[in-house]
Each structure stands twice: as C-alpha cells, then as structure tokens.
Amino acid sequence: MAVSAPPPPRTTTTRPEIQALRAVAVGAVVLHHGWPAVAPAGYMGVDVFFVVSGFLITGLLLREHERAGRIDLGAFYLRRARRILPAAVTVLLVVAAATLALVPQRDWADWFRQIVASALYYENWQLAADSQTPAYADLASTPVQHYWSLAVEEQFYLVWPLLLLFAVWYARRRSRAIAPVLLVALGAVTAASLIHSVVLTAADHNLAYFSTTARTWEFGAGGLLALLAASPLVGRERLRTVVSWAGLALIVVPILTFRDHDAFPGMWAALPVAGTMAVIWAGMPVTRWSPARLAGLQPVQWVGDVSFSLYLWHWPIFMFTPFLIGMPSPSWVMVLLVVLSLLVAGLSKQLIEDPFRTRRNPVSRRPAVLLGALGMLVAAVVGAGLVAPGIAAEQQVACERAGDRG
C-alpha cells in the first residue's frame, strides 16, 4: 500500500525537515536551560542552528549568483537585518527596562555590559574575554548571555559572502569552473576551522566554545552541503529514512547523555553537525516508518517557525522570574514559563518579525531596517550610560564591606 508524504506547511515554502530541525534545536536549548539534568548537553541545539544557517545562507547566495550572475551584498545584508534586528532589539530593550525595575543596582554593571556587547554583536567575544578574567569568570548568567550565538552568526554573515565572492572572482580570473574553486575554498576554511576548534578546545574549552573561528567549520559544513546537495534527494526512500533516523539520533542522544562539558566543542561537536547534515540531506522520505511523519506535524512546524523568537525570549523570562517570585523557579513554575515563552514567541513572530521580514514594498524596507538599527544603537548607548553608575555602586558596596571588616 502506498504511503503518502506528510504535507508541507500550507503558508511557507521552507523545507519541513529544516523547520523540524529548528524545533529540535530550540527545544534542546530551552530544555537545557529549564531542566539541565534532563538535557545536560542541550546547548548542542546551537550547533544545529549553525549548520542550518550555513546551509541556507550558502544556498541562497549560490542561487542568486546562478540566477543573476552576481551576489548583491547590499541586498543580502538588508535581508539579514530585516530578519534579525527587530526582534533582537525589542528583547534587548525589554531586558534593559526589566533590569532597571527588578535587579539590584550592584548587578547593573555586569548586566548592562553584556547588553551593550549583545547590541553590538560581540557578546561571544565578551564572554570569551570574561572566561579569561578571574574577576568575571565565575559571574552568574545574565538575561542576554544567549546572544553569544547570535553574535557568532552575524560575524559569519559578514565574512562568508566575501569568501564566496572571492572564490567566484578567482575562478573567473583563472578561467576555471566556479564549483570546484568554491569547493576548495569552502573546504579549506572549514577544515582549518575544525582543526583550530579541536586544538583550542584541548587548550581552553571556554575560549573555543565562544570563538567564532572555532565555530566557523559548523557553518562551513552546512555550506558544503548546500554546494554539493542543494536540492533534497528524490527516490531511494528507504536509504533516506535510515539516514534521517540516524541523523536525529546523532543530535538527540548526545543532547540527553553527553556530560563531559570540558571536551566541548572539539570533535564532539561533529555529532550534532553530522546529524543535522544527514537530516537535511535525507529531506522528507516517503516510507511508513519515516521520521518525516513526525517532522511534518503542525506543532513541530510551528515551533520551528517561531524558533528565533523563542530562543531570544525564553532565557530573559527564565532569568527575571526569580526576581519576581523571590526564589528560584520550581519545576511547576518552569513548565508555566515554557508555556509563556511559547506564547510570547508566537506574538513576537507575528507582531515584530513578520511585519519587517515580509514587507513587500521595497521603498519601505530601508527605513524599517534603519529604525531597527537605531533601536540597537539606543540599547547600546543606554546600556553604556548605565554601566558607569553600576560600577560606582559596586565600588561603594566593596568599600562598605571593607569598612565592616575593618
């Protein structure tokens, strides 16, 4: 008896298996933040996001070059800004206001220092530097600490298109086929980054975790997949089903069982990276026992659709709740917070992300992005203005404690 493939979402052309990967990735991160004992390596969800980003961005740029004979960097960066800035700015401004309202002034310096770093997309390097500084190494998390991965992605977006452009220019200058030159260029960068990640992890796993250069290979792996297998495979349904299940296992099993955090990322990051590549390569195979039947479920697709907003909002919600209730959140409260995070993510997607991302009038796009960039700048300036008073407050508390000891 024939088995029909799960229907794709009706309102999007996005590949359903990629939406499902986003749902798995953000679900792993949320589970790790809420119940770290259940998903001790839920942070591997970020690695899934990195591979998906590398695949999608590389494919988008290659298709543009194939269609138009060029890559429009201005249009590319405009699309990225419209996709990322509105929600990211809104969350930072809400976090800044909540910090002023709920958090003791002695913590302002550290919190706003990271708000500024997040607003200017160097949060990963701020955290990397903090990990090397004894005064900051043991500081508690802040509501914007998860922006480190967003900073890594933005830094990737700045450099990766330039690498593609250089490879295309070189191929034309040497009268060579473009695809092999791209393969060598992307492969060399990916391999170099992987080696760097393994070596750096052995020397300092904290620095490797936040380092863009140690994470580039994960984007590169997705980019190589886009270059070699841009379209989902057709046919060979049983093989694709096996590969898809194996890919999911490579993602989910480590998330639930891996505990050697000092060895990550290094070669251990290859597990979720390979798993993500396998699921993308397999697509949505049509068999009775295919994971595509689960991936195509509407709730899974919806979570994948709101994954960016859910990633941004859930951690501030988790972080500020103890200040409101006056104690660490018990498990039943965490369940409510997850539900709240999903609701906020859905509203954020509908009211903040979509109006900017899907606006059809090209003339109105640039002002919208400029408004978002202005909001990011405001967040940075306001944060910078509040860091100094926070530092002064910390110094005053330190002096008072020293006086008490005297």
Image: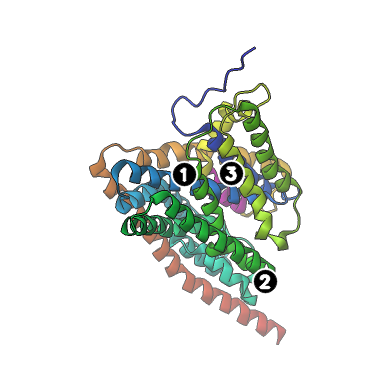
From the viewer's perspective, tell me whether residue 299 is left or right of residue 259: left
Residue at 61% x, 14% y: name it: 2
Q: CA distance from mark 1 to mark 2?
A: 32 Å
The secondary element bearing badge 2 is classed as helix
Q: Which residue is mark 1?
A: 56
Mark 1 neighbour density, 10 Å: few (under 14) some (14–19) many (20 or more): some
Q: Are marks 1 and 2 in contact (CB under 8 Å)?
A: no
Residue 203 shows which numbered tag? 2
Report the residue at 42% width, 63% height from top: 380
Question: Residue 344 placed where, x, y %?
Answer: 52, 40
Q: Earlier in the sequence, mark 3 or mark 2?
A: 2
Magenta range: 310-321
Q: Image point 43% across, 56% down: which residue?
A: 160
Amino acid found under the numbered disc labelled 1: Leu
- Which amino acid is tagged 2? Ala
Under circle 1, the secondary element is helix
Which residue is pictured at 53% across the width and 28% down the height? 234
**Residue 83 visible in the current orientation:** yes
Residue type pointed to by label 3: Met
Residue 320 within the segment the image draws in magenta: yes
Q: Quadrant of residue 120?
A: bottom left
**Quadrant for the C terminus in the image:** bottom right
Label disc, if present, on residue 277 of the rendered structure: 3
The Cα–Cα distance between marks 3 and 2, rounded to whole angstroms, is 28 Å
Mark 2, residues whose alpha carbon is within 10 Å: few (<14), some, or many (≥20)?
A: few
Given this view, does label 3 or label 2 mark the residue nearer the observer?
3
Sequence-wise, the earlier of marks 3 and 1 is: 1
> 108 and 315: which one is in front?
315
- Residue 14: percent from left, percent from top: 47, 34
User: Closer to the observer: label 3 or label 1?
Assistant: 3
- Point out residue 149 in the picture as x, y percentages from the top left corner: 54, 56
Q: Is residue 105 visible?
A: no
